[in-house]
Image (cartoon, rainbow, N blue to C red):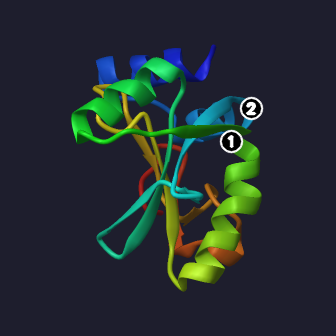
C-alpha cells in the first residue's frame, strides 16, 4: 500500500496503525518545499514542523491555500528526513522537530518528535504504542 493510499484510509476511517504509517513514510519519496534556501517549516506548540508532501498536487494546494509560492522542492525519502534531517534541524533549532505530511489536506498526518518515530536523540520524552498513543 502506498503512503498516499494509507493516509487516505486513515483519514476515512479515523483508525489505523501509526507504526505502519511511519514505515510507509520511511519507504516513500516525498517532496519537501524549499523557500529562501531553507526547508519550509513552522513553529507551533513548541515544535518545529517540517512539511512533506506525497505529490506535487498536494504541495500546490498547500501553497495556494497559504497564498505563497513555493519556488523549489526537494524529493527525499522519508527515512532520510526522519533519521538525518530531523536530528540536524533539532540540533540547530534547539528544540523538537516533527514532520507534517500533506498539511492542509483531509488526509494529512503529523509525525511527532516521539521515540519510535524519530531517532531517540531527537525525540521528546514520550513513547508511542502500536495505536500511536502515549504509552
Which residue sits at x=58%, y=23%? 3
Which residue sits at x=71%, y=65%? 119
From what the image shows, is residue 30 above or below residue 79?
A: above
Spot occupied by residue 103 in the image (x, y as percentages of width and height): 36, 39
Q: How many marks?
A: 2
User: Mark 1 or 2 closer to N-term?
Assistant: 2
Residue that mark 1 sits on = 78
Q: Quadrant of residue 107?
A: top left
Which residue sits at x=61%, y=55%? 117
For the residues labelled 1 and 2, the Cα–Cα distance comes to: 6 Å
Q: Is residue 125 left or right of residue 75?
A: left
Spot occupied by residue 26 in the image (x, y as percentages of width and height): 70, 39
Spot occupied by residue 110 in the image (x, y as percentages of width and height): 42, 47
Front-most of 115 and 98? 98
From what the image shows, is residue 126 above or below residue 77?
A: below
Q: Residues within 10 Å of mark 2 (few under 14, many from 20)?
A: some
Q: Quadrant of residue 30?
A: top right
Spot occupied by residue 86 in the image (x, y as percentages of width and height): 64, 63
Using the image, tell me which numbered label, if any, was put on residue 47. none
Using the image, tell me which numbered label, if any, was put on residue 27. 2
Front-most of 28 and 20? 28
Front-most of 71 and 79? 71
**Of helix, strand and loop, which one carries label 1?**
helix
Q: Residues within 10 Å of mark 1 (few under 14, many from 20)?
A: many
From what the image shows, is residue 117 above or below residue 16?
A: below
Q: Is residue 82 left or right of residue 113?
A: right
**Of helix, strand and loop, which one carries label 2?**
helix
The residue lying furthest to the bottom in this view is: 94
Q: Where's the N terminus, which quadrant?
A: top right
Task: Tell me whether circle 1 and circle 2 mark residues in contact (CB < 8 Å).
Answer: yes
Amino acid at each position: 500500500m502506498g503512503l498516499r493510499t494509507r493516509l487516505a484510509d486513515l483519514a476515512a476511517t479515523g483508525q489505523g496503525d501509526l507504526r505502519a504509517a511511519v514505515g510507509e513514510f520511511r519507504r516513500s519519496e516525498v517532496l519537501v518545499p524549499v523557500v529562501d534556501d531553507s526547508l519550509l517549516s513552522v513553529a507551533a506548540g513548541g515544535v518545529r514542523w517540517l512539511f512533506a508532501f506525497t505529490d506535487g498536487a498536494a504541495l500546490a494546494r498547500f501553497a495556494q491555500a497559504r497564498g505563497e509560492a513555493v519556488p523549489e522542492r526537494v524529493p527525499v525519502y522519508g527515512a532520510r528526513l526522519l533519521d538525518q534531517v530531523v536530528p540536524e534541524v533539532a540540533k540547530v533549532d534547539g528544540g523538537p522537530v516533527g514532520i507534517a505530511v500533506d498539511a492542509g489536506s483531509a488526509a494529512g498526518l503529523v509525525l511527532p518528535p516521539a521515540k519510535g518515530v524519530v531517532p531517540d536523540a531527537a525525540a521528546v520524552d514520550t513513547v508511542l504504542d502500536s495505536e500511536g498513543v502515549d504509552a
